[in-house]
Image (cartoon, rainbow, N blue to C red):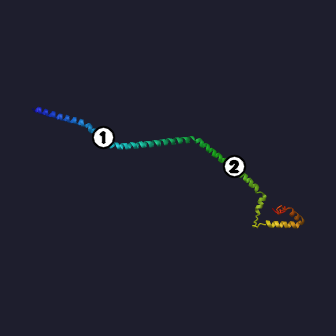
């Protein structure tokens, strides 16, 4: 009996353990799925935020890459235009040289003209300085004096000239001896 009791006790203990293990195996997947679901609910929103941030950074980075490729192409095209810049530099040097030649020729002509202008008479007259005062207009007085002198010198000739030199409007014309 002792053996049977002991065997019975061991059998019930074993069956309880098997039953407990079956119960754990039966409920363990649901518990595991609950834990997974709980974990997903906690972690999914931050992961989605990070994903959208990574996508925006990727598009921005792609734009910067395109800009960098465009800059590299621009630099390569500038390197190819080295011959054009060299030609422009040569043309500028040539134009500066031609401008200097023209200026030299102009100065040469000017000095030649100035040397002709600075003749002996001009150099001599430069030493004679006349400071004339501002005189009033003597043209009316000169005309009257000229007419008087003509009448004194040639009384008969001056009268004939005056009568023949009148125009149809009755004005006298100036004689050839007056100052113009």
In the figure, is residue 2 to the left or right of 153?
left
**Where the N terminus falls, by quadrant?**
top left
- In the image, 115 versus 138, the foreground residue is 138
In the figure, is residue 64 to the left or right of 2?
right
- Separation (CA) of disc 1 from disc 2: 93 Å
Residue drawn 24% across and 35% down?
26
Residue drawn 76% across and 55% down?
116
Q: Residues within 10 Å of mark 2 (few under 14, many from 20)?
A: few
- In the image, 169 versus 107, the foreground residue is 169
Mark 1 near mark 2, Cβ–Cβ under 8 Å? no
Please give the label number shown on residue 102.
2
Q: Which secondary structure, mark 1?
A: helix
Q: Is residue 148 above or below residue 45?
A: below
Which quarter of the picture shows residue 78?
A: top right
Residue drawn 90% across and 65% down?
156
> Of discs 1 and 2, which sits in the foreground?
1
Q: Which secondary structure, mark 2?
A: helix
Q: In the rendering, at what x and y percent does residue 108 appear?
A: 72, 51
Q: Is residue 17 above or below residue 155?
A: above
Q: Which residue is mark 1?
A: 37
Q: In the rendering, at what x and y percent does residue 25 appear?
A: 24, 35
Q: Residues within 10 Å of mark 1 (few under 14, many from 20)?
A: few
Residue found farthest to the left: 1
In the figure, is residue 53 to the left or right of 27?
right
Q: Is residue 171 above or below residue 87?
A: below
Residue drawn 79% across and 59% down?
121
- In the image, 137 versus 151, the foreground residue is 151
Of callouts 1 and 2, which one flags the residue occurring earlier in the amino acid sequence? 1
Q: How many marks?
A: 2
**Where the C terminus falls, by quadrant?**
bottom right
């Amino acid at each position: 009996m002792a053996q049977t009791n002991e065997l019975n006790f061991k059998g019930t203990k074993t069956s309880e353990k098997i039953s407990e293990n079956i119960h754990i195996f039966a409920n363990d997947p649901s518990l595991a799925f609950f834990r997974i679901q709980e974990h997903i609910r906690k972690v999914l929103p931050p992961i989605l935020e990070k994903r959208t941030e990574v996508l925006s950074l990727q598009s921005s980075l792609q734009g910067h890459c395109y800009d960098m490729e465009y800059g590299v192409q621009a630099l390569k095209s500038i390197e190819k235009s080295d011959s054009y810049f060299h030609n422009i530099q040569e043309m500028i040097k040539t134009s500066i040289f031609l401008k200097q030649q023209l200026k030299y020729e102009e100065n040469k002509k000017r000095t030649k003209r100035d040397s002709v202008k600075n003749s002996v008479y001009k150099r001599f007259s430069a030493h004679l300085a006349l400071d004339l005062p501002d005189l009033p207009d003597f043209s009316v007085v000169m005309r009257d004096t000229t007419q008087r002198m003509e009448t004194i010198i040639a009384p008969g000739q001056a009268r004939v000239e005056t009568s023949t030199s009148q125009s149809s409007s009755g004005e006298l014309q100036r004689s050839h001896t007056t100052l113009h």
